[in-house]
Image (cartoon, rainbow, N blue to C red):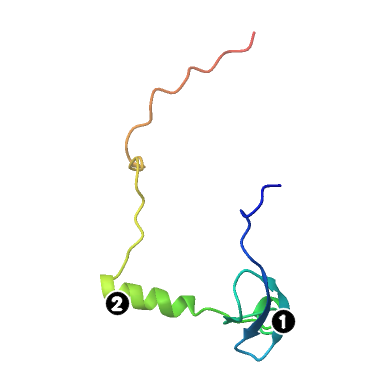
Amino acid sequence: MKKDIHPATNETTITCTCGAVYHTVSTVKNLRIGICAQCHPFFTGEQRFIDTAGRLDKFSQRYGGMTTTRRGKPKLNATAPAAAAPAEEASA
């Protein structure tokens, strides 16, 4: 391995806002983080639901009511004459 190409590593204390403290080795001294394995909802099993209905209501208020319309080819009119029906074959 080449000499003097790797950054210097130090013993580091990682502190979370929940109060958890981890001791490890890193190139940065004394890290402070906002979320860790002790307080993250995935690891704690805590469920947090996002208010998607509220977001949709806010969007429709801001940009007007949205209506669903079908894009693409228009539907055939039911009263229009059908295309030439295939001739029925007579059985012998």
Residue lying furthest bottom: 19
Label 2: how many residues lie within 10 Å, few (<14), some (14-19) or many (20+)? few
What number is the disc on residue 61? 2
Question: Relative to 9, is 46 above or below?
Answer: below
State the image coordinates of residue 62 (x, y, percent, origin top left).
27, 75
In the image, taking residue 13 as reference, residue 52 lies left or right, namely: left
Q: Nearer the viewer, mark 2 or mark 1?
A: 1
In the image, taking residue 78 as reference, residue 24 lies left or right, namely: right
Looking at the image, which is closer to me, 53 or 16?
Answer: 16
Amino acid of disc 1: Tyr
Question: Relative to 24, is 87 above or below?
Answer: above
State the image coordinates of residue 5 (x, y, percent, origin top left).
61, 53
Could you tell me which secondary element the residue under label 1 belongs to? strand
Q: Earlier in the sequence, mark 2 or mark 1?
A: 1
Looking at the image, which is closer to me, 22 or 55?
Answer: 22
In the rendered image, the quadrant that contains the C terminus is top right
State the image coordinates of residue 73 (x, y, percent, origin top left).
34, 40
Could you tell me which secondary element the residue under label 2 belongs to? helix
- When asked about the image quadrant of residue 18, the answer is bottom right
- When asked about the image quadrant of residue 33, the answer is bottom right
Amino acid of disc 2: Gln
CB under 8 Å between discs 2 and 1:
no
In the image, taking residue 78 as reference, residue 28 lies left or right, namely: right
What number is the disc on residue 22? 1
How far apart marks 2 and 1 lie (CA) works out to 47 Å
